[in-house]
Image (cartoon, helix red, strand yellow):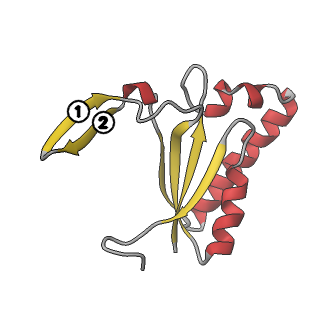
Amino acid sequence: MKYVVLIHSNPEPWGHPTGAHVAAYQALPAAERARRDAAFEELLTELQGNGELVGGEALGDPGTATLYREEAAEVLVTDGPYSELKEHLAGFFLIDVADRERAEQVARQFASPGDTVELRPAMWPGGDD
């Protein structure tokens, strides 16, 4: 079963890893940040090693986005970001796991101070298989 782990954040300035630019993460003691960073690298290594990590990418600053919207049979092009929010989509990971329980175990490990993690099933083209 494929799931997308979406990382919502608002680093200032925009950058990756987001923890390096999020005040709530930076407020943690240095030893705790180092522990969390090492645990995250271990998680990625585990997911890659057992074939559960399909892919993932950090996303650029929402201010660099271009939006395309169809209205009255015309495509309108505007500058981003899509909406004025406190948090924007900062990146994603696509995982392929045995079941929802495993996906939830993985998503919990992506949680970090200052970020919000969203877990969503991926759909096959044309429906929710």
Q: Three-letter amino acid code at disc 2?
A: Leu
Which x, y percent locates residue 46? Answer: 65, 60
The residue positioned farthest toward the left in the image shown = 73
Question: Is residue 125 found left or right of 52 in the rendered image?
Answer: left
The residue positioned farthest toward the front in the image shown = 72
Residue bearing the label numbered 1: 77
Which x, y percent locates residue 115? Answer: 67, 40
Is 83 rendered above or below residue 40?
Answer: above
Q: Are marks 1 and 2 in contact (CB under 8 Å)?
A: yes
Q: Nearer the viewer, residue 83 or 55?
A: 83
Which x, y percent locates residue 102? Answer: 67, 71
Which x, y percent locates residue 4? Answer: 52, 59
Is 66 rendered above or below residue 41?
Answer: above
Q: Three-letter amino acid code at disc 1?
A: Val
Question: Is residue 110 found left or right of 3 in the rendered image?
Answer: right
Question: Is residue 94 found left or right of 118 in the rendered image?
Answer: left
Q: Residue at x 42, y 76 (%)?
A: 128
Q: Nearer the viewer, residue 24 or 110?
A: 24
Instruction: Assign a secondary structure to mark 1.
Output: strand
Residue bearing the label numbered 2: 67
